[in-house]
Image (tube, rainbow, N blue to C red):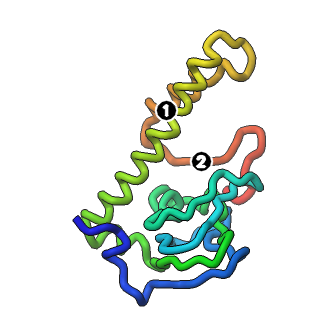
C-alpha cells in the first residue's frame, strides 16, 4: 500500500513561511493538508494543543468529515512544505485506500485520547470534584451515537455554530 504522500502530486504542493496560517479555527474550507516538511502547531481557543513535524500528518479531516468549521488553527512554526487538497471530499472518495489511511490515523488519535482518559479516570476515581467526571466523559465518548456533531462548550458556546 502506498503512503498518503506517495499518492499526492507536486501540483498540490504549497509553501508557508513561519507564522502563516494553514487552517483557521471557525472557517469551513473543505480543504485537507498533508505535511511534507517543517513544523506546525495546532491551536484551539488560543491554547497550543500540539506541535508536529511528522511527514504525512493530515490536517482538516475533522472539519471535512464532520461537515463543521475547523475546530483548531494550524499555523506554520517554521518554513513548511505541504500538499493542499482543495476538494478534499472528492479526493477521499476517489480511493478507498486513501480513506483507509485517514481512518487509521483518526483511530490512532482516538486510541491515544481514550487511553489518556482511562489514565485520568484511574488517577481520579475517588475524587468528588470535577475530576471525578472523567468517567462520564469517557462513557459519552465510547457510547456516543451518530448524531449531529457540536464541538462547542456548554459554558462557552461557539457563536459561529
Q: How far from the left and from the top, in percent, is residue 3?
A: 31, 67
Q: How far from the left and from the top, in percent, is residue 23?
A: 62, 70
Residue located at (63% from left, 53% from top): 50
Dot 2 crowding, Cα within 10 Å, few <14, some 14–19, many 20+: few
Instruction: Look at the numbered discs 1 and 2 and tell me whether their residues touch, using CB distance below 8 Å.
Output: no
Q: How far from the left and from the top, in percent, is residue 5?
A: 37, 73
In-front residue for pair 131/79 = 79
Quadrant into which the N terminus falls: bottom left
Residue located at (54% from left, 79% from top): 81
Residue located at (70% from left, 42% from top): 153
- Tell which circle, 1 or 2, labels the residue nearer the N-terminal end: 1
CA separation in Å, label 1 and label 2 = 23 Å
In-front residue for pair 86/51 = 51
Q: Judge whether 46 appears above or below 97 on screen.
A: above
Quadrant into which the C terminus falls: bottom right
Residue located at (57% from left, 60% from top): 52
Instruction: Describe the element under mark 2 as helix, strand or loop.
Output: loop
The answer to whether residue 67 is left or right of residue 47 is left
Q: Judge whether 6 appears above or below 63 on screen.
A: below
Residue at which label 1 appears:
115
Q: Judge whether 22 appears above or below 42 on screen.
A: below
- Residue 155 seen from this side: yes
Residue at which label 2 appears:
150
The residue furthest bottom is 11
The residue furthest left is 1
Instruction: Describe the element under mark 1 as helix, strand or loop.
Output: helix
Q: How far from the left and from the top, in percent, is residue 115?
A: 49, 32
The answer to whether residue 93 is left or right of residue 77 is left
- Residue 32 seen from this side: no
Dot 1 crowding, Cα within 10 Å, few <14, some 14–19, many 20+: few
Amino acid at each position: 500500500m502506498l503512503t498518503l504522500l506517495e499518492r499526492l502530486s507536486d501540483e498540490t504542493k504549497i509553501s508557508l513561511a513561519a507564522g502563516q496560517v494553514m487552517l483557521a479555527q471557525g472557517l469551513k474550507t473543505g480543504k485537507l493538508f498533508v505535511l511534507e516538511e517543517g513544523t506546525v502547531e495546532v491551536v484551539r481557543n488560543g491554547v497550543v494543543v500540539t506541535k508536529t513535524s511528522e511527514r504525512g500528518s493530515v490536517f482538516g479531516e475533522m472539519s471535512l468529515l464532520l461537515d463543521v468549521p475547523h475546530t483548531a488553527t494550524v499555523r506554520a512554526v517554521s518554513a513548511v512544505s505541504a500538499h493542499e487538497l482543495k476538494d478534499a471530499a472528492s479526493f477521499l472518495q476517489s480511493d478507498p485506500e486513501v480513506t483507509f489511511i485517514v481512518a487509521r490515523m483518526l483511530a490512532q488519535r482516538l486510541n491515544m485520547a481514550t487511553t489518556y482518559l482511562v489514565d485520568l479516570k484511574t488517577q481520579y476515581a475517588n475524587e468528588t470534584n470535577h475530576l471525578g467526571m472523567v468517567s462520564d466523559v469517557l462513557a459519552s465518548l465510547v457510547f456516543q451515537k451518530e448524531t449531529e456533531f457540536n464541538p462547542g462548550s456548554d459554558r462557552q458556546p461557539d457563536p459561529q455554530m
